Image (spheres, grey):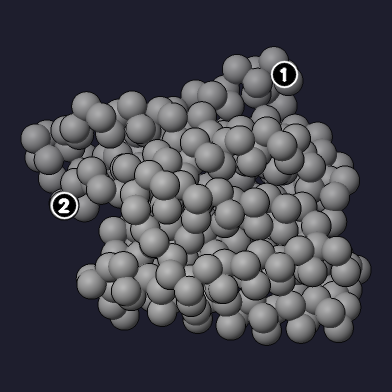
Amino acid sequence: MIGIILIMRVVQSVCSKQASNDLPLSWTGRFSYFGFSHLCSALCALPVFLVDGAHVTASAVILGIGSGICIVIASVCSQLALQSGTMALSSMFSAAGLLIPCVTGIFWFDQPMSLWQWLAVIVLLGATYLLVISSRTVYARFSLKTIWLLLGSFLANGATMLLQTVYSLHSGGENVAGFSFFTFAVPAVLLIGMAHCTGTGEQRQLPKRLYGLGICLAVALFVINQLATQAAAVVPGAVLFTLINGGATVISALVGAFLYREKLGISGTIGLVIGVAALVIIKAC
């Protein structure tokens, strides 16, 4: 499952960067795009949900809606941050969100962190600082707004991982399809409703390429969410999300370097290497 997730991360990295370049300037258009993408993810989850008997539980609905809202916030912050920051930096902030389920796991799930893991957290912060320096040399538009967007991505991704873990442990890995369906369906309805309330029909129209990118991202996001939630029932969060997000960070850096000419430089390369090393230490210890 983790291998499939990493393959989907490649699709997600390429499509996210391209979509960030094509995003409409108006919030109406952005609501329309993210609503469309999440609607496609919900449609992916619907057949699996129906095959499972369309079984609905209160935890699947409540935690699914919470997870969906967090995913929307993470997607918006991440794709807007890509307009003025490197893919490696954005991915590192997203990956660092694993600190939230790791820390809460100490108190909620009886999954304590070792001294080495805490030291790795400090190293991860240093790696992030080096990647910030590297990103500022690549994008002149890098600003305080970019930092706020990255922090939003960090918190929202962390909250998403936490809710996935809570649901998996609470449900024992059952009715994951229902959880995924509500994760995407409710935010999709809200976003599409916001698009219709805030602008004109012309503003809601998207470039044709964004429809294709939205579908690809929707499939990737559904598969990642579905498999990560299933895996969280049997793999500790510190291990699972380190493998998923550590691999995603390397993938994003390679995609950015080879497809979008985002040269990391010395500080960026060092930041990437020690950042991934820190993630591995968190996983291994």
Q: Is residue 234 above or below residue 36?
A: below
Apparent side of residue 10 relative to residue 136 in the rendered image (left or right): right
Task: Categorize mark 2 by other alpha carbons within 10 Å: few (<14), some (14-19), many (20+).
Answer: few
- Residue shown at 51% from the left, 29% from the top: 219
- Residue shown at 48% from the left, 41% from the top: 12
Apparent side of residue 117 relative to residue 74 in the rendered image (left or right): right
Q: Report the Cα–Cα distance between label 2 and label 1.
A: 41 Å
N-terminal of the two: label 2 or label 1? 2
Per the image, the residue denoted by label 1 is: 53
Give me the disc on residue 265: none
Q: Quadrant of residue 180?
A: top right
Q: Is residue 115 above or below residue 235?
A: below
Coordinates of residue 207 in the picture (x, y in percent):
19, 32
Q: Amino acid at mark 2?
A: Leu
Q: Quadrant of residue 281?
A: bottom right
- Residue shown at 55% from the left, 49% from the top: 251
* Nearer the camera: disc 2 or disc 1: 2
Quarter of the picture containing the N terminus is top right
